[in-house]
Image (cartoon, rainbow, N blue to C red):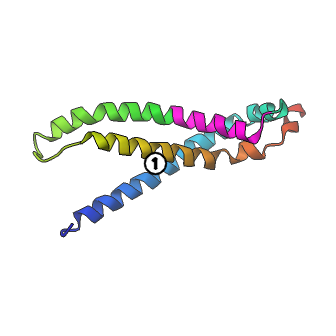
Amino acid sequence: MQTGAGGALSLAALLGFIIGLAIVSQTMYASTMENLDEFATLKALGASNWSVRRLVIGQSFVCGVAGAAVGFAAVPPAVGLASRVITWIVCPAWMFAAVGMALVFLCSAAALLAVQPAIRIEPGRVFRA
């Protein structure tokens, strides 16, 4: 803390979270815009806005879990290799839980940002040629 390294790492973590939120949000937004007609069809069939939100949040969680699985699988070998050079490096088990909780928040926030066009879509759009 006295060297400023803790503050720098905290700032890097915050920036990483913001950039991750932007990337996941843009990915989910692109997916939502690509399937806008399908969301209009769901709404024309009687799906509520909450159902559409749950669908997009579910898609976001599937993407997040896939990414987390790859990332979590890569951490132990990377820490093992890094520990040869940096002897004090560790990755405690609670770190996986903390990152998992941050991932849930990130995916939820990104999905709620990206779902807005699907919520605003007019169900009658399906019946136009």
Give 117 or 61, whichever is nearer the viewer: 61
| Side of 20 relative to 88 (left or right) | right
Q: Residue placed farthest to the bottom in the image?
A: 2
In the image, is residue 111 above or below residue 76? below
Residue under the image location 66 percent in, 44 percent down: 115
In the image, is residue 71 above or below residue 89? above
| Side of 114 relative to 1 (left or right) | right
Residue under the image location 10 percent in, 39 percent down: 84
| Side of 124 relative to 31 (left or right) | right
In the image, is residue 35 above or below residue 9? above
Label 1 secondary element: helix
| Side of 93 relative to 35 (left or right) | left
User: Which quarter of the figure has residue 42?
Assistant: top right
Q: Mark 1 points at which residue?
A: 20
User: Which quarter of the figure has residue 95?
Assistant: top left
| Magenta segment includes 89 | no
Q: Which amino acid does label 1 sit on?
A: Gly
Mark 1 Cα-neighbour bin, 10 Å: few <14, some 14–19, many ≥20: some
Residue under the image location 83 percent in, 42 percent down: 122
Residue under the image location 51 percent in, 34 percent down: 63
Number of marks present in the image shown: 1
Q: Give the range drawn in magenta.
A: 47-62
Mark yes or no: residue 84 visible: yes
| Magenta segment includes 59 | yes
Quadrant showing the C terminus: top right
Measuring from the top left, give residue 9's x and y in whole percent: 29, 58
In the image, is residue 46 above or below residue 90? above
User: Which quarter of the figure has residue 81?
Assistant: top left
Measuring from the top left, give residue 89's x and y in whole percent: 17, 46
What secondary structure do most residues of the magenta stretch adopt? helix
